[in-house]
Amino acid sequence: MKHIGIDLHTNCFTVCYLEAGKPEKIETFRLQEMGLQKFIETLEEEDEVALEATGNSCFFRDQVLPYVSRVVVIAPWQFEVIRRSVKKTDKHDARAIAFFLSKDMLPESRIKKTEHNQLASLVQTREQLMRLRVSLINKVHGLFNRRGIKIKKETLTTQKGFNCSVAAYTWEVLERIEIDVIKEQLESLRKSLAKLEKEITSFAETLPGFKNLISIKGIGALSAAILLATIGDIADFEKTGNLAAYLGIVPRVSQSNDQHLVGRITKRGSKIARKTLVQCTLIAKRYSLYLDSFYQHIKAKRGSGKAIIATARKFLNTIFYTLKNDWVFEDFTQFKLLSRQSS
């Protein structure tokens, strides 16, 4: 049995082989040009392989997994030995990975299914386009401010509002050119975003858990798709606390001797999913007396900002059990579930 540590790059990878009773062996392969196939030929069924999570680690794992007993994808932020190494070389990194793999001391990164990864990629692309759209709208809003014209930024977010606002004033030649170019880009972005959102929701409808989530008041089709893309298989999470930690909505804890400090939320994981969760919570608490009373209770003691985060954490419990227990709500406001006969 060999313990194999890999330092993976986009064009090559360095491999360290550790095998009991045999000297250490380090070799570098090209990722293309049959290099991966040559590496696979060195593998045996009982071998274990480990590598850090990178952009192409899932591809590498899928190619290697059929030929070995185990492939560990390491969570980099939990594996400080490599990240803080003074001697930062490919050989040293591969050696460290192989050594800690042989001791079964590697923090394993969670690997989602291909369909969830593909959906998450679409969601990220949509988020990037949304940021670009906001940036362009801010630019036009700045042109109005520069002219001393007071206008609500929200007016520029719709095509009709943008055109009417721009047409109401006379612009210099260069300003008009700039506005026309931005207008073209915004129209293109609107079409692209509409296409993406249609495909995201259409694909999400085929995934387990979609019907469960949209039965919760406050979670729409797009929000359900974003949450499913981030959560993946709910079976990977044993408790609600595990899911909350994965989404970065748990407080930081620092403990030393008698000192115990609790800080703000960690914000680890998907920022898009956290934002979506909070937005859904704001809507859900309008319909759920339980969530609203919890929110008002925390708000009175700690303010609205902390109250909505605490309520989102509470709302996440409902999402967890809805997916875990395959619940579908007939009436979320009354917490009434749809009977199996009805479904």
Image (cartoon, grey):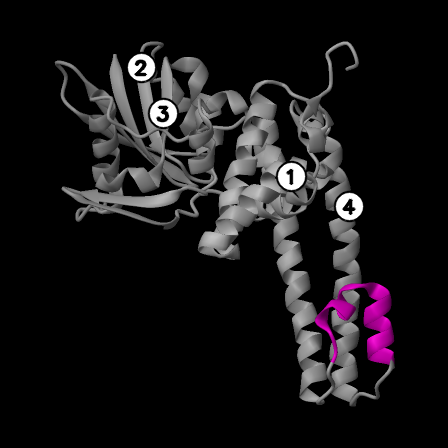
Q: Earlier in the sequence, mark 1 or mark 2?
A: 2
Image location of residue 199, percent across then percent down: 74, 38
Q: Are marks 3 and 1 in contact (CB under 8 Å)?
A: no
Residue lying at 34% horizontally and 39% vertically, measured from the top left: 76
Residue lying at 39% horizontally and 47% vertically, measured from the top left: 266
Q: Are marks 1 and 2 in contact (CB under 8 Å)?
A: no
Circle nearer the viewer, 2 or 3:
3
| Residues rendered magenta in the picture | 151-167
Circle nearer the viewer, 1 or 2:
1
Tell me if mark 3 has few (under 14), some (14-19) or many (20+) residues whose alpha carbon lies within 10 angstroms of its own. Answer: many
Circle nearer the viewer, 2 or 4:
4
Image location of residue 241, percent across then percent down: 43, 31
Residue named by callout 1: 289
Q: Earlier in the sequence, mark 2 or mark 4?
A: 2
Residue named by callout 3: 72
- Residue 158 lies in the magenta-colored region: yes
Given residues 48 and 310, the one toward you in this image is 310
Residue named by callout 2: 47
